[in-house]
Image: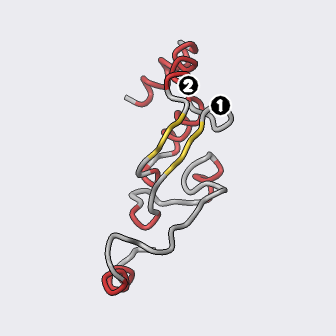
């Protein structure tokens, strides 16, 4: 499905321009689960110099093995990442327990 989207966008460049006009601001949720191919598709369709983008995610919940090559492709986390140091999801006691079972 992603390859088909990639092919359609490359064969019809006006679609990309129309998407950029229609979506000048793009929010990417669960960005830690975005593959290299998906990032390539996102970067070519919504490049940061033409569209305002914001990615959200938690590397501790990633389903992919994050490595430096992901970030080099414009993946998550990016160069200008901001870290939320305190969670409002649960208290410190639960965070301490959950931290001990993290794979990272």
Query: Nearer the N terminus, badge 1 or badge 2?
Result: 2
Q: Is residue 30 above or below residue 6?
A: below
Q: Residues within 10 Å of mark 2 (few under 14, many from 20)?
A: some
Find residue 70 and report its horizontal and vertical position in percent. Answer: 58, 52
For this orientation, the residue located farthest to the front is 88
> Residues under labels 1 and 2: Cα distance?
8 Å
Residue highlighted by disc 1: 50
Residue visible at 53% across and 35% down in the picture = 25
Q: Is residue 60 above or below residue 44?
A: below
Q: Is residue 21 above or below residue 71?
A: above
- Nearest the eye: 6 or 31: 31
Residue visible at 46% across and 50% down in the picture = 31
Find residue 62 and report its horizontal and vertical position in percent. Answer: 41, 60
- Nearest the eye: 67 or 78: 78
Please tell me in which quadrant of the rendered image residue 2 appears. top left
**Please, what secondary structure does the residue beneath circle 1 have?**
loop
Tell me, yes or no, whether the two marked residues, 1 and 2, touch with CB atoms within 8 Å.
yes
Q: Relative to 77, is 103 on the left or the right?
A: left
The colour scheme is: secondary structure
The N terminus appears in which quarter of the rendering? top left
Q: Relative to 14, is 60 on the left or the right?
A: left
Residue highlighted by disc 2: 20
Residue visible at 57% across and 32% down in the picture = 46
For this orientation, the residue located farthest to the right is 49
């Amino acid at each position: 499905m992603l390859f088909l989207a990639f092919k359609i966008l490359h064969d019809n460049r006006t679609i990309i321009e129309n998407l950029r006009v229609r979506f000048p601001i793009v929010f990417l949720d669960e960005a830690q689960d975005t593959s290299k191919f998906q990032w390539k598709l996102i970067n070519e369709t919504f490049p940061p110099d033409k569209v305002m983008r914001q990615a959200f995610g938690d590397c501790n919940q990633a389903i992919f093995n994050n490595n430096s090559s992901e970030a080099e492709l414009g993946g998550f986390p990016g160069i200008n990442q901001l870290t939320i140091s305190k969670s409002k999801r649960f208290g410190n006691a639960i965070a301490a327990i959950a931290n001990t079972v993290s794979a990272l």
